[in-house]
Image (cartoon, helix red, strand yellow):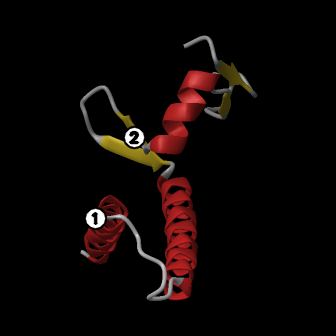
Amino acid sequence: MDNITHLVPVTCQCVIKLDPFQFNYYEQSCIEIHSPDGDHLESIGYDTQKQIQEEQTTQLQEQIVLLQSLCEKITQEVELPAQAIAGLGDLLFRVRGIFEKQDR
């Protein structure tokens, strides 16, 4: 690979500089390093994935609270179209599914 720089020729230390595509992949998944025999040597990126998932969950929770607050402000005097009510129901159903998957 041309993106590997050996720091000291007599040791195994090296630096791998990711190109934009590799970095994007790294942010979206984990990278595993295997030996030529297929033995698992190292996993990289698990902590990054966990942090991203936690940030997304927090953001989703904040959006749910905002949506809930908005829904509470709607009085009986305001009538929403049936399509809007169905859309909100669908959205809340999908949000529930996301949280149920995370709890597993």
The image's mark for residue 34 is none
Q: Secondary structure at mark 2?
A: strand
Instruction: For marks 2 and 1, give the one nearer the viewer.
Output: 1
The image's mark for residue 32 is 2
68 relative to 31, above or below:
below
Residue at the (61%, 32%) spot, across then down: 12
12 left or right of 76? right
Residue 20 point in image, percent of width and height: 63, 24
Amino acid carrying mark 2 in the image: Glu
17 relative to 87, above or below:
above
The image's mark for residue 86 is 1
Residue 99 point in image, percent of width and height: 33, 73
Q: CA distance from mark 2 to mark 1?
A: 43 Å
17 relative to 100, above or below:
above
Amino acid carrying mark 1 in the image: Ala
Q: Nearer the viewer, residue 89 or 3?
A: 89
Q: Nearer the viewer, residue 101 or 43?
A: 101
Residue at the (75%, 27%) spot, across then down: 8
Q: Which of the two discs, 2 and 1, labels the residue nearer the N terminus?
A: 2
Residue at the (47%, 42%) spot, across then down: 28
Task: Return the residue found at the far top.
Answer: 2
- Counting the numbered discs, the total is 2
Q: Secondary structure at mark 1?
A: helix
Residue at the (34%, 71%) spot, across then down: 92
Which image quarter holds the N terminus? top right
Residue 37 point in image, percent of width and height: 24, 29
